[in-house]
Image: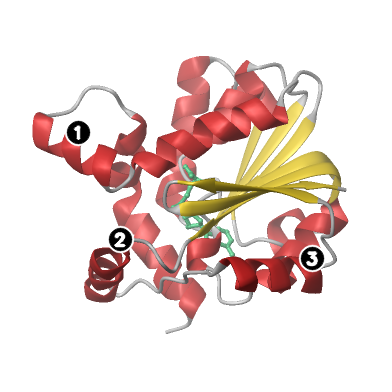
Amino acid sequence: MSVDQRVRDHFHADAQRFDAIYEDEKGAFTRWVDTVWRGVVRRRFELTLERLAPIANKTILDVGCGSGRYCIAYAERGAARVVGVDFAAAMIELADRHARNTGVAPRCDFRAGAFPEAVAGESFDASTAMGFFDYVADPATIISRMREMTRSTMIMSFPKSREWRVPVRRMRFLLSGCPLFLYSEKRVKNILSEAGVTRYDWISLDRDFIVVAHL
Ligand SMILES: C[S@@+](CC[C@H](N)C(=O)[O-])C[C@H]1O[C@@H](n2cnc3c(N)ncnc32)[C@H](O)[C@@H]1O
């Protein structure tokens, strides 16, 4: 089975559990696990909204949108149009449901498909790919496609290869059968250069490197 098929199957089965990271109501143990092991998920969400502001009237692409939390937040802040792409069907079902429940569905377009094929030929003011490159075998090609489709800003996260939680995370993904890709600072910078991204802010956040690229 290919890397993409294994990633898709993993997130199709794991969609509810992943989405629950964004919920506040949970038991003490789950809260502890989500804070210590997955706290970065919510911290990078807040950082992305700060760095993308002002969001009003922008068109935004979210690559690997998962359950749509970023897209919905963009639409709630006045984005003109938001497109979220994810090849895990259960993630897109959750995203559509959240968008309907929050009343932003008319400005959100969620597509169950692979990036870049699902948005070929389209362009956006900004694009984001958060918690995405952890699962991508050829990040330079994906970033090049994102750059071609983006006019102004790209925000991306890359999980650090040297970090105290890495051994446990590696073991968890090995047992689940889902590929996991981790990065050194040097490797991310080489990938950005290969993809033609030369102007960016570099942020070290918890277990991730965050890149805010200015095009
Ligand atoms: C950890 S989730 C992150 C979701 C969301 N960005 C967030 O942070 O809430 C990563 C998502 O990327 C999706 N994904 C990975 N590679 C993809 C590809 N080539 N095309 C579309 N979706 C992809 C997976 O299905 C998964 O739902």
Residue at (74, 65) in percent of width and height: 192
Question: Mark 3 packing: few (<14 Cα in 10 Å), some, or many (20+)?
Answer: some
Residue labelled with disc 2 = 164
Cβ of mark 1 under 8 Å from ligand 1: the answer is no
Q: Position of residue 176 (x, y in %)?
A: 25, 70
From this viewpoint, is residue 121 visible? no
Q: Is residue 87 above or below residue 69?
A: below
Determine which quarter of the picture holds residue 75.
top right
Please indicate whether residue 131 sits to the left or right of residue 20 in the image: right
Q: Position of residue 152 (x, y in %)?
A: 86, 41
Check disc 1 and report its element: helix, strand or loop.
Answer: helix
Of mark 2 and mark 1, the one earlier in the sequence is 1
Q: Is residue 131 above or below residue 8?
A: above
Q: Amino acid at mark 3?
A: Ser
Of mark 3 and mark 1, the one earlier in the sequence is 1
From this viewpoint, is residue 49 visible? yes
Q: CA distance from mark 2 to mark 3?
A: 31 Å
Residue at (61, 28) in percent of width and height: 49
Question: Mark 2 packing: few (<14 Cα in 10 Å), some, or many (20+)?
Answer: few
Q: Is residue 37 above or below residue 34?
A: below
Q: Which mark is residue 203?
A: none
Please indicate whether residue 172 sits to the left or right of residue 89 in the image: left
Residue labelled with disc 3 = 144
Of mark 2 and mark 3, the one earlier in the sequence is 3
Cβ of mark 3 under 8 Å from ligand 1: the answer is no
Badge 2 vs badge 1, beta-carbon distance below 8 Å = no
Determine which quarter of the picture holds residue 24.
top left
Q: Which mark is residue 31?
A: 1
Check disc 2 and report its element: helix, strand or loop.
Answer: loop
Residue at (24, 72) in percent of width and height: 171
Please indicate whether residue 153 sits to the left or right of residue 72 in the image: right
Q: Amino acid at mark 2?
A: Trp
